[in-house]
Image: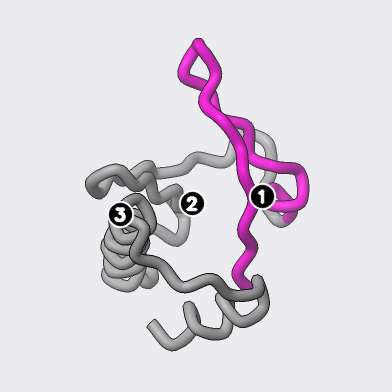
């Protein structure tokens, strides 16, 4: 299932992963961070190869959507509707 949450970057460059999103991960687990434009993709090293192409495509589409949003070219919708639409990508 896809989850969405908001966090922020600290002055020390740290990002907190919300508790609900940390479920299933253990302390000391290693991650790969991929920067694609203004997007960061965080993947467990153990599952790095799985769905990598899909992750990069998702990052591309998300960045395109943010650019449209910044220009005022966006469609407003409810959260559940957004998630259903996102699954079609």
Q: Which mark is residue 25?
A: 1
Q: Badge 2, how many Cα within 10 Å: few under 14, some, many 20+?
A: some
- Estimate the x, y position of residue 40 in percent, counting from the top left: 37, 45
Query: Is residue 49 in view?
Result: no
| Mark closest to the chain's N terminus, 3 or 1 | 1
As displayed, is residue 2 above or below residue 84? above
Q: Main secondary structure of the magenta part?
A: loop
Range of magenta residues:
1-23
Most extreme residue toward the bottom is 88
Location of mark 3 (residue): 71
As displayed, is residue 11 above or below residue 33? above
Q: Which mark is residue 73?
A: none
Location of mark 2 (residue): 44
For residue 5, side relative to residue 69 (left or right) = right
Q: Nearer the viewer, residue 65 or 2?
A: 65
- Estimate the x, y position of residue 86 in percent, counting from the top left: 48, 78
**For the residues carrying marks 3 and 1, which lies nearer the camera in this image?**
3
As displayed, is residue 7 above or below residue 13? below
- The CA distance from mark 3 to mark 1 is 37 Å
> On the rendered image, what quadrant is the C terminus found in?
bottom left
| Mark closest to the chain's N terminus, 3 or 2 | 2
CB atoms at circles 2 and 1 under 8 Å apart?
yes
Specify whether residue 50 is painted magenta. no
Quarter of the rendering containing residue 1: bottom right
- The CA distance from mark 3 to mark 2 is 34 Å
- Estimate the x, y position of residue 78 in percent, counting from the top left: 65, 74
Q: Nearer the viewer, residue 83 or 46?
A: 83
């Amino acid at each position: 299932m896809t989850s969405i949450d908001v966090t922020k970057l600290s002055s020390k460059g740290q990002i907190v992963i919300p508790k609900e999103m940390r479920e299933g991960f253990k302390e000391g687990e290693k991650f790969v961070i991929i920067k694609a434009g203004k997007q960061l993709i965080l993947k467990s090293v153990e599952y790095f190869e799985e769905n990598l192409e899909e992750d990069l495509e998702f990052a591309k589409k998300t960045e395109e959507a943010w650019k449209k949003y910044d220009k005022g070219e966006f469609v407003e919708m409810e959260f559940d509707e957004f998630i259903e639409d996102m699954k079609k990508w």
